[in-house]
Image: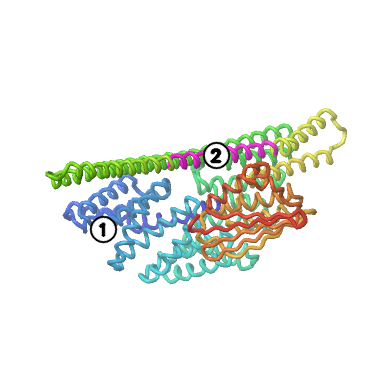
Amino acid sequence: MLRISVLTVFFLFSLSLVAQHLTESQLDSLEQLLPVIPEGEEKVDLLCKLTKRYDGIDSSKTFGYGNYALKLSQKLNYGQGTAHANFMIGRAHMYDRPEVALKFLEKGDSLASLLLEKDPSTALKTIWAAGKYNLGLTYGFMGKHEQELEITYEILPVIKEIRDTFQLANIYTNLGIKNINLGDYSEARDNLVQGREIYRQLGDPKEVTYNLIQLASVYKNLDSLGVAKRYLEQAKANLHRNYDPFDSFHYHLEKSQFDLEEDRPEQALSELERSLALLPNDTLSLQYSLIVQRMAKIHSAMGNHAKAIKYIDRFIGNSELRDDGIGVFKGYYQKSTYAAIAGKYKRAYAILTKAIDVYDSVETQNTIQKIDALELQYRTAEKEKELLKLQNEKDKADLALETQRANGYLLALLIGVLVFAAFTAYLFYRNKLRKVKHKERRRENELELLKQEQQTKIYSAMIEGQEKERKRLAIDLHDGLGGRLSGISLNLSKLDKDQPSEYPRKRLKKVVDDLDASLQELRTIARNLMPETLVKFGLKAALQDYCSNMTGSSTTVTLQYYGNEVGILMTQQVTMFRIIQELINNAIKHAGASEVLIQYIRDGKNVHITVEDNGVGIPDEALSENESKGMGLGNLRTRVAYLKGKLDFHSDKSEGTTVNIHFELDAA
C-alpha cells in the first residue's frame, strides 16, 4: 500500500509540474481576457481553464475561479460547463481531500455521461475522459484500486478515439505502476512499454526517463537483472542530459535496491541518502517514511543497531505526524527487534509492549468507527420509517377528505329519500369504516411486532457476536501471546539474575525464537479479525489461505472453487467467508473431522456452498434453533438470513455432516 501511494503521488506531482511549466507564460494573458468576455458559455470555459492552470500554483485562485465557473454555468443552465467545473474543483481537492473530491468528480461524471448520450462531441469526450480519469485516481488514493483500474480501462478507448496521445502515455504509465504494486509484472511491463513508445514519439525525454526507471523495477522483479540494469543505465544517461529532481529521486531509490540485490549495503545507503536530499523539509511525506525505514533495515543488517534505531525513530515520528497507527505499530515492533539483537532485552520487551498497546488502540478506534457507522445506518433507517409514517398519515387524511366529500354528495342526492333507506346507508358506511380501521390497526400492530422481533434478533446477534469475539480474543491473547510474552520475560529475568560467565547464545536464541513466535501469534489474531487476503485479493484467495492454514498433520481441508467474485459486494464476500470459517471450525473442533471438503460454485446470480466432513455428526438437539448457541449455529443462521439464503443440514454419526447453503446475489 505504501509503495502504491508513493509512486502514484510522485507521478501525478510530476505531471502538475509539467503543466505549470508549459502554461505559466499564458496565465497573465488568460486573466486579462476575463473582464472583457461577457458572462456566457465562453467565459465559463475560460474560468475552467484558469482553474486547471492554477492548480498546484495558487490554491486561492484555483478554488475562486472554479466556484465562479460552477455558479455561472448553473445560472446559464450550461450543462457542459457545469460538468467541467465540477471536474476541475474535484481535481483541485484530489490530493489532500479525496472524500470531498469524490463528490465533485462523481457529479461531473454523472452530468457529462448524460450529455454524451445527446452530444458525443470531441470536446465533451475530452472533458469527460480527463475528469473520469481523475475520478479513478481519487478511488486509488482511497485504497479502492480495483475501481481505479476499472475506470482506467473504461476511458482508454475514448482517449484513443480523440487521439490525446500525451494523456494516453500517462495512462499506460500509471497502469504499469498499478500492476507493479498488484504483483502483475508481465502486465506492468506491457503497459510501460506502450507508454514509453508514445513518449518517444512525442520527444518527451523527461517522461521517458521515469518510464525507464519503472521498467528497470519490473525486469528486476521478473529476475531479468541484465535487462533491468540496461534500462537503469539508459535512465541515468537521460538524467545527465535532462536533469529532473523527480526522476533523480526515483533513480537513486531504484538504484539502492539493485545495490542490495548485489550485496552492496554501503552503496545502497549512499543512494538512499541522495534520494533523501531531494526531499528537504518534507518529513511528513510518505516518501520520507519509505526511505528512513529502508535505511534502518540496512543499518541493522550491517550490525549498526544504534543507527538503525535512530532511523526507525524517524519513521515512528513520521507515522505519528501522519496519524498512521499501523505505521507507528510497525515502527515500535521493528525497534524492539533491533534492541533485542543489540542485547538490550528489557528495553526490547518494553518497546514490544508499547507496540502491542498501539495496535490495540488502532483496532479499538477501527471498531468504534464501525459501530458509529452502524449507528448512523440505524438512525437513517429510523428517519425513513418516520417519513413513511407521515406519508401514511397524509394518505389517511386525504382518504378522510375524499370520504367527507362523497358523503356530502350522497346526502345531497338522498334528500327526500325515505328515512329507512338513509338509515340503511348509514349502517353500511359505519361497518365499512370499522373494517377499514380494524384492518389498518391490525396491519400497524403486525408491522410493529415484526419491527421489534427484527430489532431483537439484530441486537442479539450483534451482542452475541461481539461477546464471542471478545472471549476468543481474550483467550488468544491470554493463553497464546500472553503466555509466550510471560515466558520471554521470565527467561530474560533469569538470564539477568544468573549472570553467566559465557555468552548465553542458546538461551538468547530461545528468546528471539519466542519473540518471532509471538509475532506469528499476533499476525494470526489479526488475520482472524479481518483477513488481509480477503480485502486485497478477494474471496477465493482468502479461502485458499484459510484452508491451507487449517490443514495439519491430523486434518486435511480441501477447497473446490468454481466461479469468481465479480459483482459480489465486499460485505457479501466477508459474510460468506465467515460462514465457511464457522463450518470448518465446527467440523474440526466439535465433530473431530480428519477430512473437510468445501465446494463453492457460482452459476450466474446463484451461489451454492457445500461443506462436508467425516466427523461424528451434530446431535439433533444442537440443530434446533433454540439449542444452537454452543456450536455457533445461531450466528450461522443469522449470516445466512442476511444473505436471504437457504441453509440445510444433513448429519449422520457414521457418515459425518453435510451443510448446503444456497442464495441469489440479487436477493442478497
Residue at mark 1: 79
Residue at x 37% of width, y 71% of height: 161
Question: Above or below — where is 56 with respect to 515?
Answer: below
Measured Cα–Cα span from mark 2 to mark 1: 43 Å
Query: Is residue 157 or residue 639 the one in the foreground?
Result: 639
Q: Which numbered disc covers residue 129?
A: none
Residue at mark 2: 367
Question: Dot 2, how many residues are within 10 Å of its Cα: few (below 14), some (14-19), or many (20+)?
Answer: few
Magenta span of residues:
447-475
Residue at x 47% of width, y 71% of height: 197
Position of residue 364 measured from the top left corner of the image (x, y, whole percent):
57, 36
Q: Is residue 272 visible?
A: yes
Question: Above or below — where is 133 with respect to 327?
Answer: below
In the visual, does 224 lie left or right of 53?
right
Residue type at tag 1: Gly
Position of residue 412 measured from the top left corner of the image (x, y, whole percent):
13, 45
Query: Is residue 578 or residue 242 the one in the foreground?
Result: 578
Residue type at tag 2: Thr
Position of residue 160 measured from the top left corner of the image (x, y, whole percent):
40, 70
In the visual, does 321 lie left or right of 354?
left
In the visual, does 200 lie left or right of 599?
left
Residue at x 60% of width, y 63% of height: 601
| Main SS class of the magenta portion in the image | helix
